[in-house]
Amino acid sequence: MKAETSRQSFLEKFKSIHVALTFRDVFLLPGRAEVEPSEVDVRTRVTKTHNLNIPFVSSPMDTVTESDMAIAVARHGGLGVVHRNCSIDEEVEMAKRVKRAEALIIRDVITVAPDDTVGQALALMEKHNISGLPVVEKTKLVGIVTGRDVRFAQPSLSVKQVMTKNVVKAEEGTSIEEAQRLLGDHKIEKLPIVNKTGELAGLITFKDILLRGKYPDAARDENGQLLCAAAVSPFDLERAKKLDEFADILVTDVSHFHNANVFKATKTLMSEVSADVIVGNIGTYEAAEDAITELEHIGGFRVGIGSGSICTTTEITKAGSPTLFATAQVSDAVAKYGADIPVIADGGIRTPGDVAIALTAGASAVMIGNLFARCRESPGTLITIGGRYYKQYRGMGSPTAREKRYSLDRYSLPSKGVPEGVEGWVPYKGEVSIVLDELVSGLRASMGYAGAGSVQELWRKARLAALSPSGAEEARPHDILLPSESQEV
């Protein structure tokens, strides 16, 4: 039988090898600056329809992002992606907490009925960490009950026996200024909003008004609620549809998205939800090209395979695509097809300079796990080792993460039998606001060196150069005994 002539020879595989550069291999070349670092604009898009005030996204890992982290990152202008290594109800509840954290008008109001008991009202307040509940009979507002009303009342009493019946309320369309005046005049903390027939339509709280002033740069939706994203498996349509009621963005959580079965499942998922869908992870031009031409309504790309500090995929399988290389590959495909799809560089970010380099390669935002896992808001366990604080951090392909089994299909369907992640401890840093302030300040400085006043300008103007091993050594502090090293001498 005649051999195929179109097949690439084995030797040619070596001749066509790509150089997959990483963040450690390159640096930014200084450029002419027209603005000072403090004037640099770091606003960006995370999907086609959602904007961020800072280009930072917390990773959907069970030691990184639950509701506390998602709330904190969104308040500072970024985005949190709640993990899916839990039951559907647990992930939905995390998304609900993010959306309830603050809003101009709370639409998903938790209520009680007049015949409910004080004990039931107290349980609801404790479960949702709230201090008051509108009392609704069918759909009509008939009263309000607060912590002061029920705290010392008998649990068996009915809510209608202790509630305030003459409720101070406002009609739909009331301005925030008018709502604030009503709250102040009546010395109350919650203002129910009713429609013309007296049905409960929402709730404005004094706390939310204060928080809006405290976090003016928060990433919010069109209703003033914090922006929220949630991770899903393309094969878990039930989870996606339930999360779609609350999350603004769904993120497919697949280690190798460039797969025919994954594409097919994602196409079905996209047709069933209204939220923007960020797809990934992908790492090549061809993967982006296939996704752009085969899938409609892609909200964004999540790119990078094997670069995470707790990921062992490339080490074990010898397969992967370093985040910087993947970002450039996918961004070129997006540009070639005029797709205008934001790219999120996921993995390998250690410093603000890495963020600047990722943006230079075409990213609109970066996704971070390790740095955020060190923060108070991450769900990882806090321990003391040698007199210093550390927090638990593990990959979603690690043995203990896989034991929960909810995220097993991230690494294939059915899941592979080999772990593709490790677990350990990272130094405790404090509140995530500290990490974000350092990242944003450093990013603005990097962009200033590159002569770019915005993310879009960084795409156009920034230039990269390769860093040799001796150059990398010279770029670090050298020929000096540092205090941290002197302790070891």
Image (cartoon, rainbow, N blue to C red):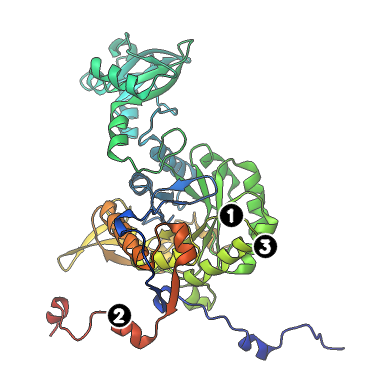
Label 1: how many Cα within 10 Å (few below 14, some 14–19, many 20+): some
Among the 4 quarters of the image, the one containing residue 102:
top left
Amino acid bearing label 2: Ala
**Which numbered marker is on residue 373?**
none
Q: Which SS class for mark 1?
A: loop
66 vs 415: above or below: above
The numbered mark at residue 340 is 1
Q: Is residue 320 above or below residue 376?
A: below
Read off the residue under disc 2.
Answer: 475
Write the residue at 41% across / 50% down. 80
Q: Nearer the viewer, residue 339 or 87?
A: 339
Q: Image height check: is 349 above or below 269?
A: below
Q: Are marks 3 and 1 in contact (CB under 8 Å)?
A: no
Q: Amino acid at mark 1?
A: Asp
108 to the left or right of 290:
left
Of labels 3 and 1, earlier in sequence is: 3
The nearer-to-camera label among 3 and 2 is 2
* Mark 1 or 2, nearer chain start: 1
- What whole-number distance in Å separates the C-alpha atoms at marks 3 and 1? 15 Å
Q: Tell me how far mark 3 sits from mark 2, CA to CA.
A: 40 Å
Q: Which element carries disc 3, helix, strand or loop?
A: helix
Amino acid type of the residue tagged 3 in the rendering:
Asp
Could you give the CA–CA distance between mark 1 and mark 2, rounded to whole angstroms? 36 Å
- The N terminus lies in which quarter of the figure? bottom right
Q: Position of residue 87 (x, y in %)?
A: 47, 46
Residue 12 visible within the image: yes
Q: Quadrant of the C terminus?
A: bottom left
